[in-house]
Amino acid sequence: MQKPIGVYIHIPFCERKCTYCNFNTTDFFEGLAERYIDAVSREIAYWGENLTQVSGDPAQVDTIYFGGGTPSIVDAAHLAQLIVSCRAAFEVAPDSEVTIEINPATFSKSKVAQWLRAGINRASVGAQSFIDAELVSLSRTHTADDVRRTIEVLKEAGFENISLDLIAGLPEQDLADWEFNLREALAIQAEHLSLYMLDLKEGTQLYAQVDRGLRPQPDDDLAAEMYRMISSATQVAGYEHYEISNFARIVECGVAEPISPFRSKHNLKYWTGAPFYGIGCGAHSYDGSARWVNILKTDTYIERVAQTGNAIAERNELTEADRAAEALFMGLRLKEGVSLAAFRSEYGVDVIERYGDELPRLADAGLIEIGGGRLTLTAAGRLLSNEVFVSFV
C-alpha cells in the first residue's frame, strides 16, 4: 500500500520582501493572483490524473500546506478553490492536516471564518519577533500587537492547532531581547512553535547589509546560548522538542515520553522521506526516487501550465546512495533519530559499517549517541547539527 502523500501549494505573493527571505516571492496584484490560482488548479488536476494513471487509483493525501510568500494575502475564496481542486484530483483523507501560513498584516476575521469553512484547520503565524524595532529591521509589515490579535482571533474562531514562528540570533539582538521574545511566545500557549536560528542566506537584503558592514555580524556564541535557552524554556513550558527547530505542546496521557499530537504532520514528510508534491512556481517535489522543482517566475509558470499541465524546470533522479544519505541526516533531525535496523532494511546500508570512521569521532565529541538500536543527536549535536550532517554527505 502506497504511503499518503503531502501536497505543498506555493502562494508567492507578498506585500514586500522581508530582509532575511530567500524564498520565491513576487508582488501581489489581484489580476495576477487570479490567473495564478487558475494555473495552480490546473497543475493539481495534472498530478491527480498522472498519479491515478500510474497506480490505477487516486493518490491518497493526508496533508495540504499553503506556504509562501504570503498565502493569507489572497482572497479566501481562492484558497477554497484550490482545496476543492485537491479533493477532485486526490483522495483527501477527512482528517487531513490543512495548514495556512499567515502574515498578521494580511489578516481579517472574515478570512478566518472562510478558511475554516474551506477545511483549513491549522494556522502557522509568522510572528518572527515580539519587538517592534526588530520587526521594522526585518521589513515585516506588522507589529507585535498584530501578532497577539491574530492569535486571539484564530482561537476565538475555533482554530485548535496554531503554530508560531520566531527567529533568534538577529543582528543587534541580545540575550535579553531573545528572552523577552521567547517569554511572549510561550505565554500565548500555541500548540506548536517553530523557533529558528537565523540562517544568513547570500542574496538576501540582510546578507548584503551585514556584508557591507551596515549591520553587525551575528554572534555565533550568543546564538548558541539562545538555542540552549530555547531548549530549556520549552521543556519547562511543556513542549516536546521533536525536531531541531520545532516544538509541539505535550498532551498529558500518562506516558513517560509522550509524542505530541501537534507535531507538524506535513513537515514530518520532509524529515521521514515520505512523498510530497509541490504545486506552484518554484515548488519542490519528491516521490521517493527523484526530486524536481518548478519554474520560478510566476508568469512563465502560468504559461507553461497552460501549455503542458505541469511546470517542471529541473528533475534529479536519486541514486540509492543519495537516498540513504538524505534519509540519514533528515532522520537525525528528529528526536527519535534513526533506527539502525529499519535503515538497513530500507536502504541496505549498515550505518555502523558505512560510517565507522566518523561515528566514534562524533560520539567522542558528544554530538551523537548510539543506543537501543538507534542513532540520535545529543543536545550539543542539535546545536551543531550541520557539523554532524556533513559527515554523511
Image: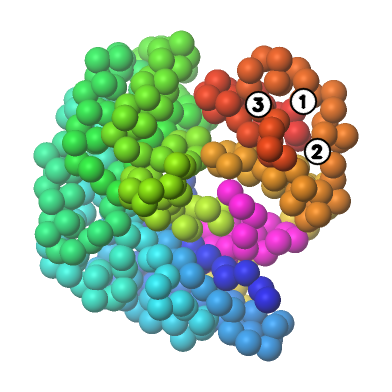
Instruction: Answer yes or no: is residue 185 visible.
Output: yes
- Residue type at numbered disc 2: Val
Instruction: Answer yes or no: is residue 307 visible.
Output: no
Q: What kind of element bears circle 2?
A: helix
Q: What residue is at 67 percent from the left and 15 percent from the top?
A: 365
- Residue type at numbered disc 3: Ile
Q: What kind of element bears circle 1?
A: helix
Q: Is residue 186 left or right of residue 230?
A: left
How much space separates mark 1 and mark 2, taking CA atoms? 9 Å
Contact (Cβ within 8 Å) of mark 3 with mark 1: yes
Residue 350 lies in the magenta stretch: no
The one nearer the camera, 358 or 115, is 358
Tell me the magenta residue range: 271-293
Quadrant location of the N terminus in the rendered image: bottom right
- Residue type at numbered disc 1: Leu
Judging by the rendered image, the residue that carries numbered circle 3 is: 368
Q: What residue is at 33 percent from the left and 48 percent from the top?
A: 252
Judging by the rendered image, the residue that carries numbered circle 1 is: 359
Q: What residue is at 78 percent from the left and 55 percent from the top?
A: 346
Q: Which mark is residue 351?
A: 2
Q: What kind of element bears circle 3?
A: strand
| The quadrant where residue 326 appears | top right
Q: Which mark is residue 338?
A: none
